[in-house]
Image: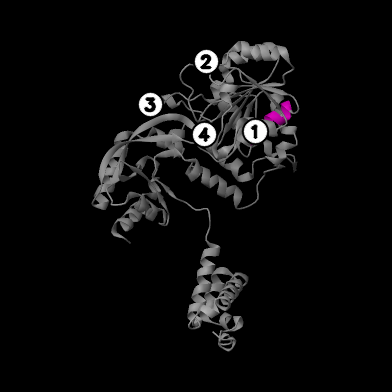
Amino acid sequence: MTALSLRDLPSVDKLLRSHAAAEMIASYGRPLTLAALRRTLDEIRTQAEHLSALPSREEILQRAAEYLSVWSRPTLYPVINATGVIVHTNLGRAPLSAETLKAVQAVGQGYSNLEYDMRRGKRGSRLLHAERLLRRLTGAEAAVVVNNNASAVMLVLSALARRRRVLISRTQLVEIGGGFRVPEVMKQSGAKLVEVGTTNRVHLDDYRQAIAEQPIALVLVAHRSNFDLVGFTAEPSVEEIAAVTREAGLPLAYDLGSGALLDTALFGLRHEPTVQEALQEGADLVCFSGDKLLGGPQAGIVVGRADLVAKLKKHPLARAVRADKMALAALSATLLHYLKNEALEKVPVWRMIATAPEMLSARVQGWIAALGEGRAVEGRSAVGGGSLPGETLPTTLLALDVPHPDRFLARLRGCNPPIVGRVQDGAAVFDPRTVLPEQEGAFLVGLENALRGG
């Protein structure tokens, strides 16, 4: 390719005057379209010596359009969760109720009273939003909301025990998702970690001895929500530990994690400690997530004694980890479902947990009829999200006997919206428990196209 032939490339200005470029400008704006055209021309010039002919003007415009499509494509988008894992951390954890989404839209599309006191006509505090609902639901004296539960624990430790000692049992030094470890979170807060007991056994005397031997600022209990401790084990209850901390005049913080407000045992699962129970057992502060079993947005929530919560609200870190207006709106709307005793019908996480097995079986039979193939097999759904490890719910799965199930699932992940399933006993399987009703049409279209090679 000679330098002379490169002069035959159309100029950017000439390309911009084309009808195709005008359509791109209308869709993506002039600056981004200009960048795509320049990128395409630069690429052609770089590869010129390997080309047998220059691309046509139409080909250049098409390449630029492909760049624009890739550049503007969102990296965060909806997917269809057919895995049967209800609180799927990798797929966004808890889906929100219709009322919660409306609340977010109402607050997000305009101005709000986020930090404005309408009665006084002066600046207010965002910290009061959701607090009244949390107090009523849990019986706590006060509450504060931050951006996630790790931040909630960090705030508690920073505000109450910075440069001071915090007791925690070695049985509770867990690692949560993404490689984050409780001891490391504690150290980042500036608190000094004091471990008691052994990796499998801890006794009340271990707490008493540690408190007697050195000044302690806080005792922390971390709920093991993502694994079980079995075998030769021993561990005092929160109520027993609370009695020791009260006697010593020390605050007890309980990192509950999952944020259950309802009893999971009512649905055939092992009982998960609820926030209300944690307070009743004597915890002075309870930290938990908003987007696990609570079924709301990502948030970290601390409820408990008013004097301790007041210290959290005043600490400088509270501003750095504060929740935004949309999270507060979503959390308040979700909590209202519990207050109105409609969580089982309105909160998707609990609606999935409470779905009767016969309803799941009927949905699968409907899928088989619609697709004209597949078989129904027994399966198990998981709660997920680091809650109730090993606990599952009975379900009926749609099984598709395709030649290469892994490749088939990869094809489904390329659908719009993507479909995420799993392999079981050599078949591609899909759990109706986590396929939202409003996504069922797209789900069946995606399966149909993948089965027919579309």
> Do the residues under discs 4 and 3 have CB atoms within 8 angstroms?
no
> Do the residues under discs 4 and 2 have CB atoms within 8 angstroms?
no
Which of disc 2 and disc 4 is earlier in sequence? 2
Label 1 and label 3: CA atoms lie apart by 35 Å
Q: Using the image as rendered, state which of residue 335 and residue 447 is in the foreground.
A: 447
**Residue at which label 1 appears:** 184
| Residue 322 percent coordinates (x, y) | 67, 40
**Residue at which label 3 appears:** 268
**Which range is magenta?**
151-161
Q: Residue at x 39, y 33 (%)?
A: 354
Q: Mark 2: which amino acid?
A: Ala
Label 2 and label 3: CA atoms lie apart by 26 Å
Label 4 and label 3: CA atoms lie apart by 18 Å
Q: Residues within 10 Å of mark 1 (few under 14, many from 20)?
A: few
Q: Is residue 346 visible?
A: no
Label 1 and label 4: CA atoms lie apart by 26 Å
**Residue at which label 4 appears:** 294
